[in-house]
C-alpha cells in the first residue's frame, strides 16, 4: 500500500485552490474544461510525487530496462485511469460528488490522445500498463503526433476525415525534456576516410531534425513505480531563417521549419504517393533513431562504455516492423560514434532486439524502394548492404545453390528493403500474437527462417489490461465481482476464475443482468448525447467494433442483417427478439472499398428505419469516431461480440477479449484469439461458425462464389439488392463495386477473396442458434458469467509475464 494518498477533504481543497490560482475563478463559475484541468492537476500532483519518489531507483539498482518502440500507443484518457491506479478513486469520486461536479461530463473534457489507429496501438498501451503494474522498468517510445490519425465524421452516410487536434487544450500529463533533445540526420552522403589505420565512415551534408522528448507518466495499479511513455516531437534546427524574414520573405523564412516539423504532424500519412511513403520512412527513422540514441546515452550514464553488458541492461522491442530501422541504427551508433568493430556491434545488436509480428497481410509487410531508402538514409543503407551480404553468405551455407529461397529471405532484394526479413534475421526472438498466427508465421510467412532457427519464433497470445477494461470501464460489474469473490482479482486477474460457480446462482445472475442493463442505458444516453442516436435499451446489443477491413468482414455482417430484413419484410408473421447492431470502424482514408462498406452500413440503417415492422426488430447504429473512450462505454453494454474474420487473417484480435471480460457472448470464426477464447470458456459458451484454416486453404484453390450465389436464394436476393436501387435509390450503382468484387473479383484476383458468401450460410445458422439461446435468459446470463470468469488468462499481466520470462528477462523493481 502507498503512502501520502490524498483524503477527500484535501482533494476538494486542492481543486478549489487550483481553480483560483490557475483560472481566477471558483467552482460555481468555472467552465467544465477548467474544472477538468483543476481535477487533472490535482491528480497530477499525486502522480508526480510518486514519480519523484521512484525516480533514480532503477539507475541505483542498475536494473535492466526495456524500450518498447511502437508507431502507435492508443493510451486513451488518463484522468480516471490514474485515479484508479493511485488506488484513490473513491476519494476522488466522493470529492467531486461533494463539489456537485457531474463526473462523466468532466471526464469527457479530456481529449483522447490520437496516438494510434487500432489493435497494435492499444496493445502497446495495455502492455505499458502491465509492465508498470508488475514493476518492470520500461519506456514506451513513439512520435508525438500533433494531429493523431483523424477524427471521423459521418456526413450523409460517408466517412469524412477531420484533423484530430487533441493537443488544442494543452496536455497536462506531459513533461517536456528539452535537455534530452537529440539530432536525427537525413540525406547527405557518406565519405570513407582512413583514421589511425582503420576505415571510418563519415556522414556529411545531411539535414538535421531535432527530436524533442515529451514524457507521459504511466502508473501501475497500487505500484510505487512510474514508467514513461516518451513521445518524440520534430523541431527544425533553426526555428526561423532571419535572412529571409528580414527580406520580407515570410513564407520562405518558415519553410525549413515546416518541412522538418511535418514529421510529427500525423500518424500514417497517406502513402498513395511517393511523398507520403517518404514521409512515413522519415517518421520511422526519426523516432527509432532518437530512441536508440537515448537508450545508448542512458546506458553510458550508468555503465560507462562497457558495451559488452549492453544486452544485459537494455532490451529493445520492435512492435511490428515500423521501428525496424532501430536495428541498423544501433549498429551505426556503436560503430560510428563509439568505435566498435562490426563483429562486436553485431553481437550486441543480436542480443538486444526482439520483434513482434502483428499481421500476415502482405500489404502490411513493409518494403521500401532501395533508391528512396538510400537517398534518405545513406549510412543506414550501407549498413544494411553489409548485413545483407553477411546474411546471404550464411544462408548460402545452409541452402547451397537455392538462390530463390535466399532471395526471399534477404534484407535487400529486387530493388527493395524488406523490413520483416531484417527483423527476423537480426532479432533474437520473434513472436506471433496468438497460437494460430504463430503457426502461420512458422509454416508460411517466415517458413524459410523457421527451418534454419526453429526456436526463434514463439507464440505469446495477446492480452488486455483488466484495470482499464473492467475496473475502470465497468465499475458496477467490478463491484459485483468483489461482492461475490472478494477483491483479490484486481491485483491477480487470473483469480476471476473463482466467479465460475456463480453462473449457476440465480440471484447472482439477476444482479449481473441488472448491471448489464444499466450499462446499456449508459450507452443509450452516451449515443444520444454525442450523436443524437436513439436506441432501445432492451434490444440485444450486438457490436462489431474494429478497424474497417475486408478481411474483418463487416460486409458479411451487413449481408446477414439484410437477409434478416428480407425475412421480416416478406413474412408478416415473422418475429424475433429486437436487436440493435452497433458498428464502430474507421477506414484508412485511401481505402475506397472500406469507405464504401461504411456507406453501405448507413444505407441499410436508413432502409430499415423506413420500414415500420422491420424497424421494431432491427436497428443499426454507426458509432462515429470509434476510439478508446467510446469503446469504454460500448463494451460493457454489449451482449454479442462479432469476431468474424476469415480464418487465418486476424493475427489475434484484442477487442474479442475486452467484450468477453465484460460478459458479451462471442459469435466468431476459429481465427486469431477466438481459438483460445473457445478453449478457455468451452465450446458450449461461444458461437463458432465458418471455415477452419485448412478449409480456407483448400477453398483458395477450389472456391467459386457464383455457386453460393446460384444455389442460395436468400443470398442471391441480398446481393441483387446491392445493385437494384433498394439501398440507394438515388444512385443504384453506388454499391456495384461490392457486388462485383464478391462475384467476379478485381484486378484479375479471385472473386470473394475473403469468402464472405462462402461463410454466410453458416453464419446465418449460428445467428439462429444465438437467438434461440437469448430466448432463455437464464442460459444466456450463465454463459455470460462463464465468459467473465474465463477471461483472466487474457489479462495483459499474463502476456507481459510471458514476454518477460521468454524474451526480456527484466527484474521487478522493489521500492
Ligand atoms: C499496417 C498498415 C498498412 C498500411 C496502412 C496503414 C497501416 C497501419 C498499420 C498497420 C499495421 C497494423 C497491424 C495491426 O494493427 N495489427 C493488429 O495487431 C493486433 C495486436 O496484436 C492484433 O490483435 C490484430 O489482430 C492485428 O490486426
Image (cartoon, rainbow, N blue to C red):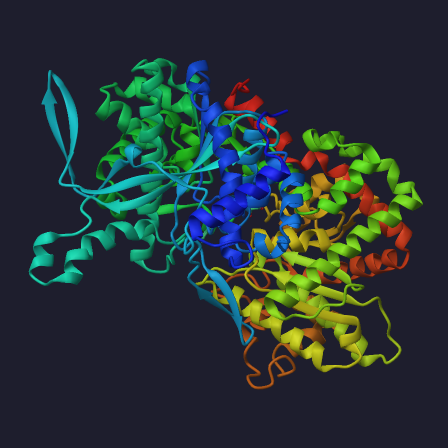
Look at the image and tell me whether residue 445 can be seen. Answer: no
Task: State the image quarter where residue 229 is shown.
Answer: top left
Of residues 123 and 321, the one nearer the viewer is 123
To which quarter of the image does residue 541 belong? bottom right
Q: Position of residue 474 (x, y in %)?
A: 70, 47
Point out the image quarter for the N terminus: top right
Q: Quadrant of residue 626?
A: bottom right
**Position in image of residue 660 (x %, y %):** 72, 46
For residue 483, side relative to residue 192 (left or right): right
User: Is 253 on the left or on the right of 678, as rendered?
Assistant: left
| In-front residue for pair 88/784 | 88
Q: Count all numbered tags in the image, as a single digit.
A: 0
Residue 442 is situated, as x and y percent measured from the top left of the image, at 55, 34
In the image, 375 versus 601, the foreground residue is 601
- Residue 240: image location, x then y, percent: 17, 52
**Can the viewer see residue 597?**
yes
What residue do we see at 58% from left, 37% from top? 10
Q: Using the image as rendered, state which of residue 330 and residue 225 is in the foreground.
A: 225
| Residue beneath the point at 92% across and 42% down | 505
Q: Is residue 372 above or below residue 710?
A: above
Left or right side of 74 for 539: right
Q: Residue furthest bottom?
A: 730
Question: Which quarter of the figure is the C terminus placed in?
Answer: top right
**Residue found at x 31% / y 21%:** 345
Amino acid at each position: 500500500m502507498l503512502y501520502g494518498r490524498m483524503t477527500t477533504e484535501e482533494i476538494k481543497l486542492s481543486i478549489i485552490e487550483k481553480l483560483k490560482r490557475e483560472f481566477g475563478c471558483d467552482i460555481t463559475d468555472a467552465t467544465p474544461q477548467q474544472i477538468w484541468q483543476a481535477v487533472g492537476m490535482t491528480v497530477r500532483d499525486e502522480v508526480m510525487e510518486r514519480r519523484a519518489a521512484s525516480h533514480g531507483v532503477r539507475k541505483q539498482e542498475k536494473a535492466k530496462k526495456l524500450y518498447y518502440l511502437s508507431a502507435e500507443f492508443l493510451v486513451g484518457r488518463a484522468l480516471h485511469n490514474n485515479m484508479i491506479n493511485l488506488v484513490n478513486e473513491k476519494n476522488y469520486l466522493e470529492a467531486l460528488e461533494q463539489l456537485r461536479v457531474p463526473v462523466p461530463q468532466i471526464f469527457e473534457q479530456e481529449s483522447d490522445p490520437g496516438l494510434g489507429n487500432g489493435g497494435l496501438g492499444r496493445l502497446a498501451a495495455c502492455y505499458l500498463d502491465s509492465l508498470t503494474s508488475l514493476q518492470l522498468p520500461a519506456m514506451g517510445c513513439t512520435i508525438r503526433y500533433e494531429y493523431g490519425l483523424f477524427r471521423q465524421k459521418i456526413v450523409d452516410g460517408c466517412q469524412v476525415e477531420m484533423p484530430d487536434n487533441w493537443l488544442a487544450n494543452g496536455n497536462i500529463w506531459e513533461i517536456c525534456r528539452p535537455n534530452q533533445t537529440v539530432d536525427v540526420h537525413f540525406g547527405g552522403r557518406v565519405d570513407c576516410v582512413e583514421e589511425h589505420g582503420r576505415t571510418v565512415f563519415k556522414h556529411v551534408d545531411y539535414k538535421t531534425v531535432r527530436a524533442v522528448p515529451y514524457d507521459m507518466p504511466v502508473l501501475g495499479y497500487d505500484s510505487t513505480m512510474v514508467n514513461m511513455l516518451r513521445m518524440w516531437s520534430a523541431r527544425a534546427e533553426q526555428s526561423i531563417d532571419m535572412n529571409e524574414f528580414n527580406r520580407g520573405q515570410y513564407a520562405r523564412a518558415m519553410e525549413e521549419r515546416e518541412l522538418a516539423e511535418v514529421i510529427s504532424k500525423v500518424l500514417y500519412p497517406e502513402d498513395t504517393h511517393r511523398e507520403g511513403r517518404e514521409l512515413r520512412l522519415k517518421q520511422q527513422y526519426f523516432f527509432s533513431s532518437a530512441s536508440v540514441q537515448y537508450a545508448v546515452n542512458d546506458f553510458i550514464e550508468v555503465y560507462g562504455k562497457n558495451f559488452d553488458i549492453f544486452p544485459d541492461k537494455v532490451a529493445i522491442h520492435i512492435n511490428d516492423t515500423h521501428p525496424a530501422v532501430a536495428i541498423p541504427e544501433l549498429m551505426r551508433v556503436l560503430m560510428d560514434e563509439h568505435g566498435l568493430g562490426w563483429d562486436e556491434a553485431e553481437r550486441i545488436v543480436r542480443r538486444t532486439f526482439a520483434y513482434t509480428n502483428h499481421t500476415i497481410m502482405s500489404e502490411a509487410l513493409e518494403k521500401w524502394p532501395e533508391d528512396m531508402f538510400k537517398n534518405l538514409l545513406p549510412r543506414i543503407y550501407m549498413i544494411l548492404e553489409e548485413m545483407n551480404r553477411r546474411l546471404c553468405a550464411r544462408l548460402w551455407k545452409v541452402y547451397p545453390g537455392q538462390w530463390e529461397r535466399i532471395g526471399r529471405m534477404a534484407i535487400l532484394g529486387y530493388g527493395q528493403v524488406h523490413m520483416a526479413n531484417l527483423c527476423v534475421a537480426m532479432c533474437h526472438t520473434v513472436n506471433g500474437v496468438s497460437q494460430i498466427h504463430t503457426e502461420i508465421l512458422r509454416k508460411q510467412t517466415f517458413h524459410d527462417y523457421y527451418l534454419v532457427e526453429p526456436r526463434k519464433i514463439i507464440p505469446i497470445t495477446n492480452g488486455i489490461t483488466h484495470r482499464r477494461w473492467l475496473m475502470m470501464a465497468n465499475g458496477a460489474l467490478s463491484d459485483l465481482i468483489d461482492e461475490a469473490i472478494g477483491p483479490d482479482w484486481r491485483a491477480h486477474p487470473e483469480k476471476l476464475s473463482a466467479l465460475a460457480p456463480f453462473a449457476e446462482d440465480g440471484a447472482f445472475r439477476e444482479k449481473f443482468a441488472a448491471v448489464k442493463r444499466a450499462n446499456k442505458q449508459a450507452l443509450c444516453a452516451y449515443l444520444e448525447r454525442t450523436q443524437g442516436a436513439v436506441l432501445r435499451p432492451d434490444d440485444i446489443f450486438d457490436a462489431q467494433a474494429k478497424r474497417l477491413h475486408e478481411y474483418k468482414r463487416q460486409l458479411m455482417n451487413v449481408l446477414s442483417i439484410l437477409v434478416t430484413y428480407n425475412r421480416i419484410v416478406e413474412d408478416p408473421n415473422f418475429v424475433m427478439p429486437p436487436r440493435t447492431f452497433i458498428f464502430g470502424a474507421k477506414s484508412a482514408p485511401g481505402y475506397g472499398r472500406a469507405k464504401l462498406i461504411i456507406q453501405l452500413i448507413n444505407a441499410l440503417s436508413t432502409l430499415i428505419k423506413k420500414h415500420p415492422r422491420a424497424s421494431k426488430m432491427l436497428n443499426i447504429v454507426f458509432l462515429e469516431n470509434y476510439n478508446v473512450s467510446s469503446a469504454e462505454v460500448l463494451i460493457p453494454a454489449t451482449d454479442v461480440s462479432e469476431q468474424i474474420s476469415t480464418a487465418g487473417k486476424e493475427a489475434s484480435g484484442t477487442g474479442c477479449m475486452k467484450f468477453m471480460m465484460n460478459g458479451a457472448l462471442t459469435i466468431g470464426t476459429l481465427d486469431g484469439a477466438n481459438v483460445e477464447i473457445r478453449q478457455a470458456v468451452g465450446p458450449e459458451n461461444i458461437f463458432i461458425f465458418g471455415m477452419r484454416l485448412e478449409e480456407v486453404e483448400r477453398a483458395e484453390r477450389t472456391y467459386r462464389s457464383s455457386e453460393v450465389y446460384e444455389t442460395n436464394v436468400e443470398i442471391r436476393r441480398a446481393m441483387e439488392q446491392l445493385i437494384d436501387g433498394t439501398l440507394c435509390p438515388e444512385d443504384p450503382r453506388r454499391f456495384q463495386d461490392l457486388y462485383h468484387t464478391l462475384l467476379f473479383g478485381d484486378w484479375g484476383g479471385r472473386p470473394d477473396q475473403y469468402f464472405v458468401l462462402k461463410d454466410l450460410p453458416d453464419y446465418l445458422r449460428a445467428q439462429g442458434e444465438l437467438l434461440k439461446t437469448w430466448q432463455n435468459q437464464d442460459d444466456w446470463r450463465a454463459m455470460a458469467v462463464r465468459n467473465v470468469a474465463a477471461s483472466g488468462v487474457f489479462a495483459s499481466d499474463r502476456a507481459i509475464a510471458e514476454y518477460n520470462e521468454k524474451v526480456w528477462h527484466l527484474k521487478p523493481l522493489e521500492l
